[in-house]
Image (cartoon, rainbow, N blue to C red):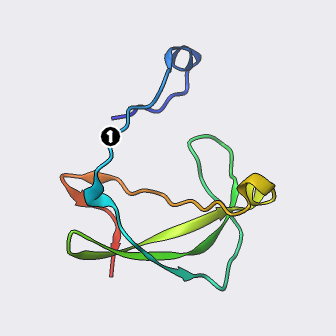
Amino acid sequence: MLKKCGKQEDLAKFTALDFYSISENYKVEAKLELNNNQKEFGMKTTTDRLPIYVNYGVAHFKLKGQYFKINIYKNIELSRREKYKDYLFMLFPVFRAGTPKLKTK
């Protein structure tokens, strides 16, 4: 489990995050339902920073026989930069005891 860093000595020792290996079992094809009523909001982060996002839409997909949906966001500031104008973002849920904490259909 990752601990929240906040102390300079923690940051000085930090080198990288540990990632799980890629599993093709979690590769999905999703249908994107666009949000036509996009309102800007400040998204909480682990710091005091509140980047401005819009809820771009909802991705609907099936995983291991169960249907899910997950919100897709667009960062307003990044979208003004040519390199990131088409970038979207999703918050991955926390998995506990093998049960995904996603909204089911």
**Residue 54 position by quadrant:** bottom right
Quadrant of the frame with the N terminus? top left
Compared with 2, 81 (above or below) is below
Residue ID at (48%, 58%): 91
* Residue 48 as seen in the image, left or right of residue 21: right
Q: Is residue 67 left or right of residue 81?
A: left
Report x, y in % for residue 23: 28, 51
Q: Quick one: SS at disc 1?
A: loop
76 vs 24, nearest the viewer: 24
Residue at point 38%, 57% (across, down): 93
Total numbered labels placed on residues in the image: 1
14 horizontally vs 25: left or right = right
Q: Quadrant of the C terminus?
A: bottom left
What residue is rendered at 34% in x and 53% in y?
94
Amino acid type at image mark 1? Tyr
Please give the name of the residue rendered at 50% of the width and 21% of the height, measured from the top-left corner.
Answer: 15
Is 46 displayed left or right of 102 in the figure?
right
Q: Quadrant of residue 11?
A: top right
- Residue under circle 1? 20
